[in-house]
Amino acid sequence: MIVRKLHEAGVTSEHAYAAALGSVGLSLASWVVSMKAEQAGVERADRWGIFVGEWAPTFFGLGLALAQYETRATAGEAGDHRSAWFGRGAGTAEAG
């Protein structure tokens, strides 16, 4: 549902991948700036770098989900919003 809403809002997988790469660069930049500008030391700089760096996997995950949704949309399957897990094997269990 979230992926569909993002897709309808015009967000593409390329946007999510760009945000992930930007997060990696911002993580490095925030670490460097924190090291230079603050007197708190390496520990504070490490925390800033790690905090911002943790966004990257989320954006990469969204990018993958959007890419999969885009692939299904081009194949004409975007109307079926069920997960692939629910589509497989449904109704194939034999009574016995």
Image: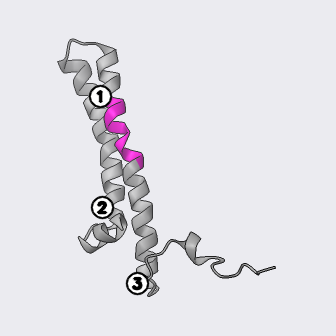
Q: Amino acid at mark 3?
A: Gly
Q: Amino acid at mark 2?
A: His
| Residue 62 at x, y percent in the picture | 39, 58
Numbered label tally:
3
Provide the residue designation for mark 2: 15
Quadrant of the snapshot with the N terminus: bottom left
Who is closer to the viewer here, 94 or 52?
94
68 vs 43, left or right, is right
Compare residues 37 and 43 and report the one nearer the observer: 43
Amino acid of disc 1: Trp
Instruction: Please state the extent of the stretch shown in magenta in the rendering.
Output: 49-57
* In-front residue for pair 27/69: 69
Dot 3 or dot 2: first in sequence order is: 2
Rate crowding at label 3 as few (under 14), some (14 to 19) or many (20 or more) other CA atoms within 10 Å. Answer: few
| Magenta stretch contains residue 53 | yes
Helix, strand or loop under label 2: helix
Residue at 41%, 54% (x, y): give it: 60
SS label for mark 3 = loop
Where does the image place residue 15, in percent across and percent down from the top left? 30, 61
Which residue is at the far bottom?
76
The residue carrying pointer 2 sits among few (fewer than 14), some (14 to 19) or many (20 or more) residues within 10 Å by Cα, namely some
Q: Is residue 31 above or below residue 21?
A: above
User: Where is mark 3, residue-wise?
Assistant: 79
Left or right of 69? Residue 52 is: left
